[in-house]
């Protein structure tokens, strides 16, 4: 997911060998421990390779100065609709963690993936009033889950760094920013280092007056501007 994960990817071409297993999670089906490995949202995670490939294709169009093609636009709309319709209660992985934690974690990832797709196909999300309202509503929707899992110091906290930072990058209302800041920074002595770095990146984004400092693309912009090399996952 290069828009947010590797901010320097647009500066030069780099070849990365991808293990075939990355393109499918079917390899885990034979293991009873798959619930522990993923923790939540296996079917949701299974969509990530398709989302990644679509965003890569859109980036290639951007490099060529092209608008999004009808084929990519159709796939984008299909994936957003599929994500929106995702049943948060569909899986029972016999996980020892409370069921509501898994549902809340899946919901945060679900909304973050939708926001990530929107960012790929709408370079300036704030210029679209309808989309800006949608982003605010999605943050509102995930706030209770974020409070429970981040502020409440859930074991899922580290696994939710990527979607947490993605959602935080779209926060505009002060009450949202305050909750995200509390959740990401939390109790300093108990906060994982990666989460602290994620919190720093989002804080820099919130303070930056440049309109480019917004959303997943804004994370890439801020990381490049401040020479931060960090892999969100």
Image (cartoon, rainbow, N blue to C red):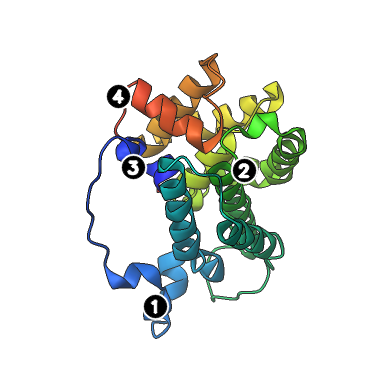
Residue drawn at point x = 68 percent, y = 21 percent: 174
The residue closer to the viewer here, 64 or 199, is 64
Q: Are marks 4 and 3 in contact (CB under 8 Å)?
A: no
Residue 231 tag number: 3
Q: Is residue 101 visible?
A: no
Point out the tag, 4 or 1, that comes first from the N-terminus.
Answer: 1
Q: CA distance from mark 3 to mark 1?
A: 24 Å
What residue is disc 2 on?
146
**Residue neighbourhood size for the residue with mark 2, other residues' Cα within 10 Å, grouped as few (<14), some (14–19), many (≥20):** many
Could you say which is closer to the camera, residue 226 or residue 182? 226
Determine whether label 1 and label 2 are within 8 Å by CB. Answer: no
Question: Whole-percent x and y of residue 100?
Answer: 66, 60
CA distance separating discs 1 and 2 = 28 Å
Crowd around label 1: few <14 · some 14–19 · many ≥20 (10 Å): some
Q: Nearer the viewer, residue 229 or 148?
A: 229
Relative to 55, 19 lies left or right: left
Say left or right for 129 vs 188: right
According to the image, label 1 marks what residue?
A: 28
């Amino acid at each position: 997911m290069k828009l947010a994960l590797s901010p320097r990817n647009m500066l030069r071409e780099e070849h990365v060998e991808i293990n075939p297993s990355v393109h499918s999670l079917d390899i885990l089906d034979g293991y009873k421990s798959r619930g522990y490995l993923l923790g939540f949202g296996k079917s949701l995670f299974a969509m990530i390779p398709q989302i990644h490939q679509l965003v890569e294709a859109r980036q290639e169009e951007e490099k060529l100065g092209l608008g999004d093609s009808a084929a990519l636009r159709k796939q984008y709309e299909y994936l957003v609709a599929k994500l929106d319709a995702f049943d948060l209660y569909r899986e029972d992985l016999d996980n020892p963690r409370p069921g509501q934690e898994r549902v809340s974690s899946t919901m945060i990832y679900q909304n973050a993936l939708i926001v990530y797709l929107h960012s790929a196909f709408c370079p300036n999300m704030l210029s679209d009033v309808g989309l800006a309202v949608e982003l605010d509503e999605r943050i509102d929707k995930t706030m209770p889950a974020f409070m429970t899992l981040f502020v409440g110091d859930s074991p899922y906290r580290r696994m939710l760094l990527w979607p947490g930072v993605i959602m935080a990058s779209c926060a505009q209302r002060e009450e949202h920013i305050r909750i995200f800041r509390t959740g990401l920074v939390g109790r300093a002595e108990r906060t994982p280092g990666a989460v602290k770095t994620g919190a720093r990146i989002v804080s820099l984004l919130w303070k930056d007056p440049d309109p480019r400092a917004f959303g997943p693309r804004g994370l890439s912009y801020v990381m490049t501007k401040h020479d931060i090399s960090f892999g969100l996952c």
